[in-house]
Image (tube, rainbow, N blue to C red):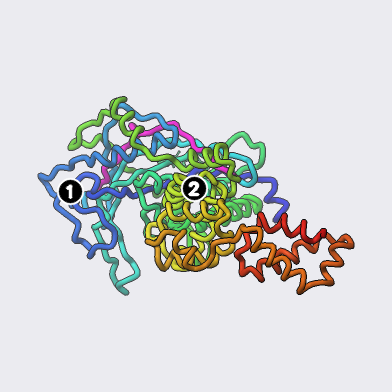
Amino acid sequence: MEDSRSKYEAVIGLEVHAQMLTNSKAYSNDVNTYGSTPNTNVSVVTLGHPGTLPVMNKKTIENAIKLGLSLNCNIAENQYFARKNYFYPDLPKGYQITQDTTPICTGGFIDVKSDGNSISRIGITRIHMEEDAGKSIHDIDVKDTLVDLNRAGVPLLEIVTEPDMRNSQEAYNYLTEIRKLVRYLDICDGNMEEGSLRCDANISVRLIGAPEFGTKVEVKNMNSIRNVQRAIEFEIKRQIEVLESGGKLYQETRQYDAVNDTTHAMRSKEAANDYRYFPEPDLQPIQVLQPHIEAIRKEMPALPSELFEKYTSQYGLSEYDALNLTDSKGIAHFYEEVIKDTTNFKSAANWVMGDVKSYLNSKGIEIQDFPIQATKIAAIIQLIDKGEISNTSASQRLFPAMIERPNTEPLLLAEELNLIQDSNEDSILTFINKVKEQHPEEVVRYKNGEKQLVGFFMGQLMKVSQGKADPKSANQLLRNELEK
Ligand code: ADP
Ligand code: MG
């Protein structure tokens, strides 16, 4: 099987639905929140009662433009909405208002880092605005399916890629970037478990070198990025097996089953809906003019890729550090705050990625709830850089104390805890002499050429001085004294 697998290559295109973090729904003033009592955020507009009219939520247009700009898309000047008709219990109107032939964004791309230094450019075919359907719940009542219409009419952006991905890892990386992006832009919370970010994966395989794509299968129902990757892996294997055993693939929609890590058929292309799209008569066409686009561009926050670039090229951080710091907007923002008060970018990165993040993880909290202000972390770094306290005591003693008393100045607290280092030669000399007295044999060995013992002596010196001898001055003095 491994052999036959290497004859094939996979082709993958993804369709992502992102629920917008707007206050109200796409075409009505119903509240848009997750987790309300079922069927409470549902007005006659959402139900499509006769005589009601939809009204476009401006915020969705703004969000779409932001996303489109950050994905290098063209923004359509003239657009209109369309009705996509189908019958389903969780679709009270009997149609979704969506964009068919005039999506707001087209022709973009995103560069996604793959393993090592390689970058894959994934084409963005289109982004269009639409509304979500309600939710059918099959697992609460034993006999009946329950319907919650709170989600009906929630604004969505659908992001469709070109069939540019060639393996499940690329799909994983792409989704990770998209989730990061919508979170940075503050337009979607990116929560795949709650379904506010959903992904359908289109997958086909072909013999390497074949001029045409193979028959594609669409897989739905993955509730994490990892599961999207798993579903793609499974599907590639299944399709190759079918072809290798002389079978034929059909264009169909399959459902991923996370428990058994398999996919099974939902519906074939022949049974697919004919949506009978036609222009939505109740909403006016939209015109987006260039000055509006420019105004939105100006308001956009720094994107993760821009920060990554700045951290690696201007601040001299490693790609690993830059990726770690830009992984979430909150952490990146905190780092930005720290480096307002120190130019020791590397040390600031270490503190944020190390002590700060470990604390957040251990408490299970987000950076927004971190007790110490960024400027005080910068103050700690300054104390270390000036040789006032050692890195070790800053991390092991001062930091935990700051957590308890975040309003105290780090210097005052360091004094109170008796952490201020001694760089006074006389007192360091006293410590050195004590160490020499305690370890006469090692002194002889050092003099006889075992210079690596300097590490041992530094350790003893720190012990004797209770960590307060400033290592920089101590190191040089120690070497001088040992030579004597
Ligand atoms: P449909 O008309 O079935 O919705 P589209 O052409 O709109 O198909 O494409 C939907 C998604 O499927 C896009 O993300 C596209 O990149 C992807 N796609 C199209 N053809 C293939 C293929 N042969 N293999 C894998 N993905 C594909
Ligand atoms: Mg399509």
Q: Earlier in the sequence, mark 2 or mark 1?
A: 1
Contact? badges 2 and 1 (CB < 8 Å) = no
Q: Position of residue 53 (x, y in %)?
A: 14, 42
Q: Secondary structure at mark 1?
A: loop
- Residue of label 1: 29
Residue 113 covered by magenta stretch = yes
Q: Residue at x 44, y 68 (%)?
A: 363
Q: Quadrant of the N terminus?
A: bottom right
Residue 422 shows in this picture: yes
Q: Quadrant of the C terminus?
A: bottom right
Q: Amino acid at mark 1?
A: Asn
Image height check: is 439 above or below 88? Answer: below
Which residue reaches farthest top?
A: 290
Q: Residue at x 37, y 33 (%)?
A: 105
Q: Position of residue 211 (x, y in %)?
A: 61, 34
Q: Residue at x 25, y 53 (%)?
A: 32
Q: Amino acid at mark 2?
A: Thr
Mark 2 or 1, closer to the camera: 2
Q: Which residues are magenta?
A: 95-114
In the rendering, which numbered label is found on residue 326?
Answer: 2
Q: Position of residue 205 (x, y in %)?
A: 59, 45
